[in-house]
Amino acid sequence: MSSRRPAGSGPIAPAVAVVLIAVLLGALVGTWPPFVAVESGSMTPGVERGDLVVVTAADRAPWGDLSTAADADAPTRLGGPGDVVVYAVPGVRGRPVFHRLAFPVDAGEDWTDRGDPDLLAADCAELATCPAPYDGYVTRGDANGLYDQSAGIAPVVPEEWIAGKALFAVPNLGWVRVGVDAAAARYGGVATGVVLVGLAGLVGGVGALLIGRVRPGDRR
């Protein structure tokens, strides 16, 4: 007589597998969470709204140190030269920013001298973050008409603000995360979590039932 798995394991197994995959991916790339969902079109056409992007720690081997679009040997990332990074400005509420490193700057530098004039709204004297108050980076969304530091999105970005850099994007897979965040904002995290757990159990149960139907008959 063949042994059978406990009846309750079917719905749980898929959810456990997803968690294990996420944990292993986080261990590999060195960041948590190991992916971000793109919620705006500021990085089109390389990354579209709704894409899911896998990110790694900025200094994680084998992907090397940070590189900018201005570097002569910059690798191509998500449709352009230089790294696309996730950074957050301390003390500022809102989502982290997902933009490309344009070029590095040194403390005290008038970085507008090296910037593209078409991406500047004013000269150094009129910008709050120029001269550069510390070493860091000038950043920009590929689809945006101004550097972040000229548009008022962020000051010069020091390396310690950078949570990770992008490796690759999976089209449209991020809509799930975007939808979850929207639901949590509207209905609350607890209610959204309860619904998600219920859906995971339902999907797992249906999947286990289908697998059971196509599995060859048990030997007795």
Image (spheres, rainbow, N blue to C red):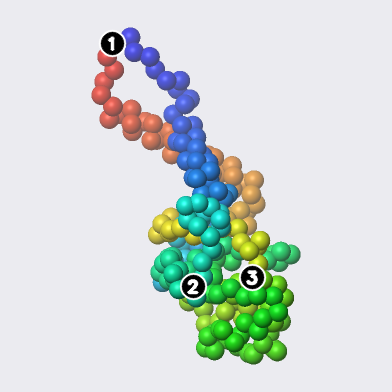
Foreground: disc 3 or disc 2:
2
**Kind of residue at disc 3:** Gly
Task: Identify residue for label 2.
Answer: 71
Residue shown at the point (56%, 58%) measured from the top left: 58
Give the Cα separation between the discs numbered 2 and 1: 67 Å
Label 2: how many Cα within 10 Å (few below 14, some 14–19, many 20+): few
Q: Judge from the rendering whether residue 192 lies leftward or rightward of residue 128; answer left or right.
A: left
- Which badge, 2 or 1, is on the more N-terminal residue? 2
**Kind of residue at disc 2:** Asp
Task: Identify residue for label 1.
Answer: 220
Q: Which quadrant of the structure image shows residue 6?
A: top left
Task: Identify residue for label 3.
Answer: 136
Foreground: disc 1 or disc 3:
3
Tell me the SS state at disc 3. strand
Query: In which quadrant of the rendered image does the N terminus lie?
Result: top left
- Which badge, 1 or 3, is on the more N-terminal residue? 3
Residue 56 in view here: yes
Label 1: how many Cα within 10 Å (few below 14, some 14–19, many 20+): few
Q: Which of the numbered marks, if any, corresponds to residue 154?
A: none
Between 47 and 118, which is closer to the camera in this rendering?
A: 118
Residue 88: x, y in percent?
A: 64, 63
Q: Which quadrant of the structure image shows residue 170?
A: bottom left
Marks 3 and 2 close (CB-CB < 8 Å):
no
Q: Judge from the rendering whether residue 38 lies leftward or rightward of residue 88; answer left or right.
A: left
Query: In which quadrant of the rendered image does the C terminus lie?
Result: top left
Label 3: how many Cα within 10 Å (few below 14, some 14–19, many 20+): many
Tell me the SS state at disc 2. loop
